[in-house]
Amino acid sequence: MKSSQILIFTDLDGSLLNHNNFEFREIKDFILNCIKNGIKIIPNTSKTKSEIQVFLDQLGHNLPFVVENGAAVHNLDLVHTNFKFKNNSLVFSRSVSEILTLFEKSIPVEFQKRCLFLKDMSSIEQTKILGLNKKYLPFALNRDYSMPLVFDGSKELVNEFTVLLKKIGMKLHEGGRIYNICDDCSKGKAMTTLIEKLKNEFNFNTHTIVIGDSPNDISMLNLSDQPCIIPLPNKKNLCYLNDKKIIRATQSAPQGWEEVVRASLKKINFQLQG
Ligand SMILES: [Mg+2]
């Protein structure tokens, strides 16, 4: 298999970045070596464009990436040099103001009251919930396509709320720390669109490795050739997924990320050089 055909779609928080301190220093050289070997790494995350930019600056390498749970893909020319799109991006979502208007108009008030939006909280609360350094808060809150919140209610009420959102064409995504109200997008849909375009427009066949840790990663894990799950420290995650293909890391992020990539490449006899 040619290295250019391997695509790694990866969640960031808890999958590539350490769940507690968002560090990835230990595997930075390994990531850069994968890229050097022609493997395309595509972050596919609930993070915003500006948050991903912070990650790319730390990595010191530009990558294509999917923002806000499948809402848009940026840097498409890095997926394929012949991809020509306006702003080098594809957008699959309505804007956050359109989503908010629809939410206020169509969701019953008793459910609206249970949604504690991060945008309405103090910076101390925001910092605590997101576990972020204050410096990075503005990047996390500068959202184009989704509204992060804490839901005040039982799991049953969350399920009811999910159904209500679905009726108006929206979704509730569960991340490692918070919920997000989004348009009818998913990490999996964005990934599939890219793969189909590569196949149909350039006859470019792919082998996809997907790495995730949370329910909002299931849509892309299910669509991958090689699903990989990273354990969260002190929390059981995605234990109910039992596809035999799944590779589960024994270590949490970032080391677990390197572990599953090495195991995935070994399975297809791909030798990393350097
Ligand atoms: Mg995650």
Image (cartoon, grey):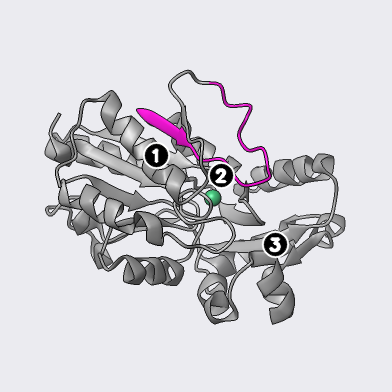
* Image mark count: 3
Q: CA distance from mark 1 to mark 2?
A: 22 Å
Eyeballing the image, is 168 above or below 270?
A: below
Residue at (56% x, 40% y) in the render: 231
Secondary structure found at label 2: helix
Quick check: 130 left or right of 96? right
Under mark 2, the amino acid is: Asn
In the image, 7 versus 230, the foreground residue is 230
The residue that label 3 is drawn on is 149
Residue located at (83% from left, 59% from top): 114
Looking at the image, is mark 2 or mark 3 earlier in the sequence?
3
Residue 216's label in the rendered image is 2
Tell me the amino acid under the disc marked 3: Leu
* Quadrant of image for the N terminus: top left
Image location (x, y in percent) of residue 65: 35, 56
Q: How busy is the neighbourhood of tag 2: few (under 14 within 10 Å), some, or many (20 plus)?
A: many
In front here: 211 or 169? 211
Q: Ligand 1: does it lie within 8 Å of the C-beta at label 3?
A: no
